[in-house]
Amino acid sequence: KQEVTQIPAALSVPEGENLVLNCSFTDSAIYNLQWFRQDPGKGLTSLLLIQSSQREQTSGRLNASLDKSSGRSTLYIAASQPGDSATYLCAVHGNQFYFGTGTSLTVIP
Amino acid sequence: GAVVSQHPSRVICKSGTSVKIECRSLDFQATTMFWYRQFPKKSLMLMATSNEGSKATYEQGVEKDKFLINHASLTLSTLTVTSAHPEDSSFYICSARDLRGGVYEQYFGPGTRLTVT
């Protein structure tokens, strides 16, 4: 069974800092990997989707990479802002979606 | 992107009653929808996969007689929590899968907060 792990579980950084969130998965047979943002008490907002044949995707200050062979993905956030504070979830899409444990990010003004 | 809605967004019910949650794909047809449950500060746990016109496939440990799933049309799936108990209080999220350009993409609803008193 696919297992998805995210490190760190929580992260607190000062505004303006660049940061990296990590996601690892055990089964490399995936269709794609997706990063989501979840605000407290809210649903999921899709940030970036990387197809299995791709290495990275970029959207604004966000860049996600995928290394299928090693079972790793990273989400890079540049010039963090207080509004980036949220929980970030990665999910791998194999025969179903498997979610990671999430990283709770706090950006301090 | 595609839109998935859920109704209601919040519901409070008394112990022993049943609650129905609706999940709709608004601008696409979804032969497959998924129901997830999220405990506080935890990740999403897949409960079941709902296929239009057939019985849902439940994950291990999920009681199918307690969590009734119906996927009667290509745009609607419902989750009914029967004889609800306080431990069923949780955040329930549905998602719908769409095939676009030969690629499956999954879209998530905004979630339903269920509180059983």
Image: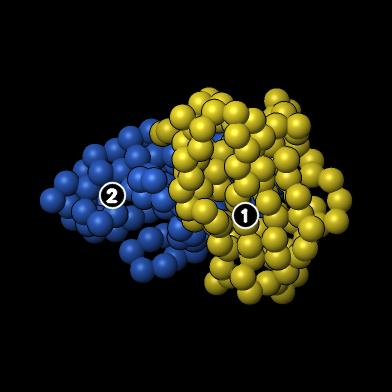
Instruction: Report which residue position mark 2 lands on.
Output: A85
Which of these two is toward me, B68 or A61?
B68
Mark 1 belongs to chain? B
Mark 2 belongs to chain? A
Which of these two is toward me, A62 or B37?
B37
On the image, the x and y values in percent for residue A37 come to 42, 52
Instruction: Report which residue position mark 1 lands on.
Output: B22
Tell which residue pokes out farthest to the left in this image.
Answer: A109
Which quarter of the picture shows residue B3?
A: bottom right
**Helix, strand or loop at disc 2?**
loop
Res. B55 in view: yes
Query: Which color was chain B given?
Result: yellow
Q: How is the image coloured?
A: by chain
Amino acid on which disc 2 is placed: Ser
On the image, the x and y values in percent for residue B8 come to 52, 53
Query: Which color was chain A given?
Result: blue
Left or right: A90 with respect to A40?
Answer: right
On the image, the x and y values in percent for residue A30 come to 69, 49
**Helix, strand or loop at disc 1?**
strand
